[in-house]
Structures are given as structure tokens and as C-alpha cells.
Image (cartoon, rainbow, N blue to C red):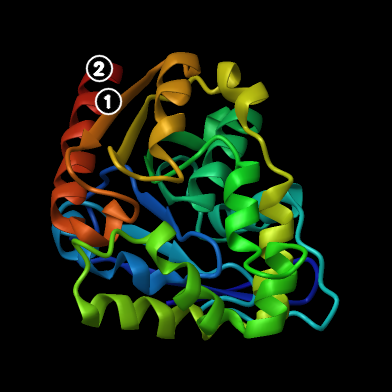
Amino acid sequence: MARIALGDGLLLHCAADDYLWPWQRAAPVLMLHGFARNATFWNRWVPTIAETRRIYRPDLPGCGASDVPAAGYRFTPDSIAAQVIAVLDALSLARVHWVGESSGGLVGLLIAASHPDRIKSLVLCNTPTRISDAIKGTYALDQTSTAAAIRAYGTGEWCRRTLDYRLDLEHASAELQEWCITEMDKTRPDIAAALHECFERVDVTPVLADVAAPVLLLSGDKSRIASEQQKILADRLPNGRLALFSGYGHGINLLAPERCAHAALDFWHEVEATSA
């Protein structure tokens, strides 16, 4: 575990999974969680990947074990990207394989476009190009916006009411569903609302042509959030490929974690063999 000081005085928590000999130097992996989630959402990936790779899993401010910002804290895409770059610098990670889920994938694309020297490849799970107006309307429930709904109902109850859009309930056990709700409820409503307001403003489409790193897109073919936009990503990324999981909806990173982890390992082996 590492605690990394950010420029605004906050301490950011980063889980470090390192089971290698000191002389083993495979390219490290950074895994960034999705909206209002935390590093534990990657737990089932870790055993498979950590056999051959060092893994770093940061929690964004207000999420997981990171410091909670004061009321009124405002997230921006640039500030989140800068915080993750601060993690890379503090841990002396010159270049990483990026794994991002949903909004964590959006952050990865933005960093890959603006700091191409820091990203060796990207594995993106359930990542859209943007949050569509239809999803914004669904997530708002009976309020004026998603942020207003989260503030009105609390993060956990909002998650419960919208869970079927972010997790394929046909494939998710009751235990997994409740765990997701409980974990997201640990993110304070004002923080979750501020995060969503930030990501609602993101559209990565204009920067896709600038992402030179190889990209593997993982998504269920029935995801109402991401699957329709996967072809856009695959078509516009210079070096992108799409792997759709047949019959699955959203949340493939949780529904088939070992399968996703093995797909990532195979992808990195290919990327490294090509670059060598």
C-alpha cells in the first residue's frame, strides 16, 4: 500500500500487489476503477495478473481508502489525470499497461492522448466514448440530474435503483449485487455527485485519433451503456481492437474477471512481442 500526497493536500491511497522477485522487470499494470467505485473492484483480477506483473490500484479522492475532499470539491478531467500522473511519478512508474473500467477507461484515453510516453497499452472495460443523454435521463430518476438524484437518495440507494444499467443482473449473483451497492455506498453522496458531473462533461471522441497505444476493448455485447459505442472506439482508435463477450450486459469486469484478466495478459504479451 502507498499513500501519495497530492498538490491540494489530499493523500491518495494506492494498493500495490507485488509478488515478484526484485529482478523481475515486466511492465507494470495500473488499474483505475470506475465512477464512485474503488480499488477492491479489481480484486478478482489480481491473482491471475500478479503472477507475472506488479499491479497498482489507486483510489480517486473520496473513494476507497483515499482522503475525502472537503464539501464543495470540484473534479475536472484534467485534475483527475494530474492525480494519476502524480501516482505514476511517486511510484517511479515511467510507463504502464493501463486497465480502466467505465470512467476509469475514459481517464486512460485522455492520459494516453496527452502523455503518450506514460501509457504502453490500454485495456478498457465497459468504456463508452461519453455518457449519452439517454443514460443521463435514466440515471436522474425523478430528479433534475444524476447528481441531484445521488444527493437526494444517497449513493447506495441511487446505485440500487439504477443497478440493472451498470451490472447485468441475469449474470450477477445476489451477493455480487449487494456487494456492489455496499461498496459504492462508501462514497459520500456529494463526492459521487461531483464525480458524475465531471464525467458527464467528457467526450473522448475528439482525442481518439491521438491515442497511438494499442487498445483492447472488453465489453458485453448487450451492455446498454457501452456496447453501442464500442464500434466507434474500435473504428477511430489507430490501434484498437474489440472483444465482445457474447450474451453479457454491463459489468464484464465483475461478471467474468478471470476471463478478462487472461485476455489482458494475452494482449500484453502480444504488445510486448511486437514492440521488441
Few, some or many C-alpha atoms within 10 Å of disc 2 (few <14, some 14-19, many ≥20)? few
| Residue type, label 2 | Thr
As rendered, which of 154 and 215 lies closer to the eye? 154
Side of 55 relative to 131 (left or right): left
Residue 85 in sight in this render: no
Q: Where's the N terminus, which quadrant?
A: bottom left
Quadrant in which residue 189 is drawn: bottom right
Q: Which residue is mark 1?
A: 271
State the image quarter where residue 245 is shown.
top left
Of residues 241 and 266, the one nearer the viewer is 241
Q: Nearer the viewer, residue 175 or 98?
A: 175
| Secondary structure of residue under mark 1 | helix
Q: Residues within 10 Å of mark 1 (few under 14, many from 20)?
A: some
Q: Is residue 98 above or below residue 32?
A: above
Count of residue discs: 2
Between the residue at mark 2 and the residue at mark 1, the CA separation in whole angstroms equals: 5 Å
Point out residue 261 in the picture as x, y percentages from the top left corner: 20, 50
Decide if residue 217 is on the left or right side of residue 94. left
Residue 85: x and y in percent read 62, 50
Kind of residue at badge 1: Val
- Name the quadrant containing residue 254: bottom left
Which residue occupies 31% across, 41% down? 219
Which part of the image, by quadrant, shows the C terminus?
A: top left
Please report the residue visible at 34 percent of the width from the left and 49 percent of the height from the top: 28
Residue 231 percent location from the top left of the image = 40, 23
Labels 2 & 1 near each other (Cβ < 8 A) = yes
Q: Which mark is residue 47?
A: none
The residue lying furthest to the front in this view is 142
Image point 42% across, 68% down: which residue? 163
**Label 2 sits on residue:** 274
